[in-house]
Amino acid sequence: MYAGFLWFPKPFIPRLKPTLCGIAFSPLICPLSSPLLLPFLPFALLRISISISPIVPPSSIKSFQLEKRTGNKCYMLSARDLSIIWGDTTHYWEWTTLPESRFEEVARLRAVCWFDITGRMNTRVLSPNTNYAAFLVFKMIDAGGFHYDPAVLSVGILGGNSSTKNVCLDPNLVDNRLDDRFHGLQRPTVRSDGWLEIEMGEFFNPGLEEDELQIKVSETTSNWWKRGFILEGIEVRPKHV
């Protein structure tokens, strides 16, 4: 161990890959060092690198990042890591690539009535004693069918308490063309990377037990055909009051 340098244990960075001589390292591309030297980077430099750009190992279905403010862990579950009803039926959903996505694949909604997406993750991988929020990350391109009933978002511990709320997923809908159920509902905002996001709910992670977090978005009551929704994933990151 060299003074001022850190060798990561495997839990520090997820999905570490074994390489030459059995050394495990992150595939983060760092302009200051080759990947083989990443385990020996000064901790401050490593933290800055990971807070600027998320780590997405090749063919990975998750990304990992450190929050700049606190160094707490942030994760994004890709569309491939989520359970999408009818997601493997090409008549309803298409798996495609977008250059602006951090993942190799995104899910594009062709047309479906039963809009139902669920994600799960173990809270053990998150930072303890931290308040988190989950965010749906997506695009709406030539979207339709989201005007009839609000979407329902929920976040909670599997088998425990959860929070649920109704939202308007399509930011292009005009208020005066919607019924009263949509008035005043939360709408998505544009992220710095160009995607839309909407907060699904928040939760506190004490870090004392291995709980299973369940995150869900659905619109299954209208029987209206929906289209034009492009899913990148669900991001879980610290939330500050």
Image: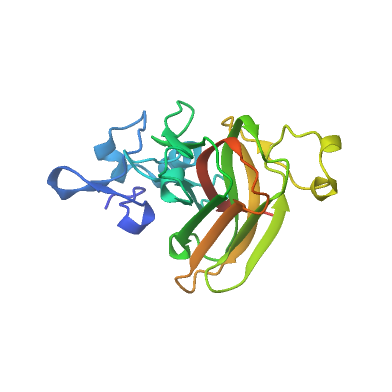
Residue at 28%, 37% in the rendered image: 35
Q: Is residue 9 visible?
A: no
Tell which of 19 and 44 is nearer to you.
19
Return the x and y of residue 105 as percentages of the image width and height: 41, 36
> Does residue 159 appear to the left or right of 95 in the view shown?
right
Say if 177 sits above or below 219 in the image.
above
Tell me the quarter of the image containing the C terminus.
Answer: bottom right
Return the x and y of residue 209 as percentages of the image width and height: 47, 74
Return the x and y of residue 81 as percentages of the image width and height: 42, 49
How many badges with numbers are in the image? Answer: 0
**The residue positioned farthest toward the left in the image shown:** 21
Residue at 25%, 47% in the rendered image: 17
Tell which of 174 and 155 is nearer to you.
174
Quadrant housing residue 39: top left
Tell which of 94 and 167 is nearer to you.
94
> Does residue 92 appear to the left or right of 203 in the view shown?
left
Return the x and y of residue 91 as percentages of the image width and height: 45, 37
Residue at 60%, 65% in the rendered image: 204
Say if 162 sits above or below 165 in the image.
below
**Colour scheme of the picture:** rainbow
Q: Is residue 67 visible?
A: yes
Tell which of 143 and 68 is nearer to you.
143
